């Protein structure tokens, strides 16, 4: 633990026992235990939060990609519709131009 061996731990405990006293040492150990537990809980919550953020980021990227795919498909579809409308309009214009010529030809045949 933190690169501290058994002899160092015994020395630290002996100094703590002398400085703090035998009556307050168990309370101090409890407090340190609670503090370590809270620290572990906070770090695990933070890690979980980062994982959730990463998952949400992945989901956002997937939705953005899907949105781009749908937009490009719609753009292609609209372009095809525009092209077909232009062709239809060109055909109508062509037919309108042919109708007067046919009526002139039929009028010449009658007269």
Image (cartoon, grey):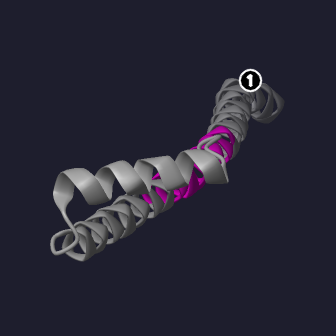
Q: What quarter of the picture does the C terminus occupy?
A: top right
Seen from the viewer's position, the closer of residues 94 and 28 is 28
Camera-side residue: 15 or 98?
Answer: 15
One can see residue 70 in this view: no
Residue at image x 72%, y 39%? 80
Residue 58 at x, y percent in the picture = 61, 50
Looking at the image, is 96 positioned above or below residue 68? above
Residue pictured at 19% horizontal, 63% vertical: 21
Q: Assign the magenta stretch its main secondary structure.
A: helix
Span shown in magenta: 49-72
Q: Position of residue 71 (x, y in %)?
A: 59, 42
Q: Is residue 93 above or below residue 3?
A: above
44, 53: nearer the viewer:
44
Q: Which residue is mark 1?
A: 101
Q: Residue at x 32, y 66 (%)?
A: 38
Local secondary structure at mark 1: helix
| Mark 1 crowd level (few <14, some 14–19, many ≥20, 10 Å Cα) | few
Q: Observer-nearest residue: 84 or 79?
A: 79
Height in image: 79 above or below 73?
A: above
- Residue 65 in the magenta stretch? The answer is yes
Query: Which x, y percent locates residue 11?
Result: 48, 48
Determine the image quadrant of residue 27: bottom left
Magenta includes 26? no
Compared across the picture, whether 64 is left or right of 16 comes to right
């Amino acid at each position: 633990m933190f690169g501290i061996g058994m002899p160092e731990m015994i020395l630290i405990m002996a100094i703590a026992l002398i400085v703090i006293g035998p009556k307050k040492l168990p309370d101090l150990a409890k407090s340190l235990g609670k503090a370590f537990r809270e620290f572990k809980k906070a770090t695990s919550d933070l890690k979980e939060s980062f994982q959730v953020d990463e998952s949400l980021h992945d989901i956002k990227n997937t939705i953005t990609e899907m949105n781009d795919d749908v937009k490009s498909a719609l753009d292609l579809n609209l372009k095809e519709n525009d092209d077909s409308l232009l062709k239809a309009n060109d055909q109508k214009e062509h037919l309108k131009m042919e109708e007067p010529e046919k009526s002139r030809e039929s009028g010449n045949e009658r007269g």
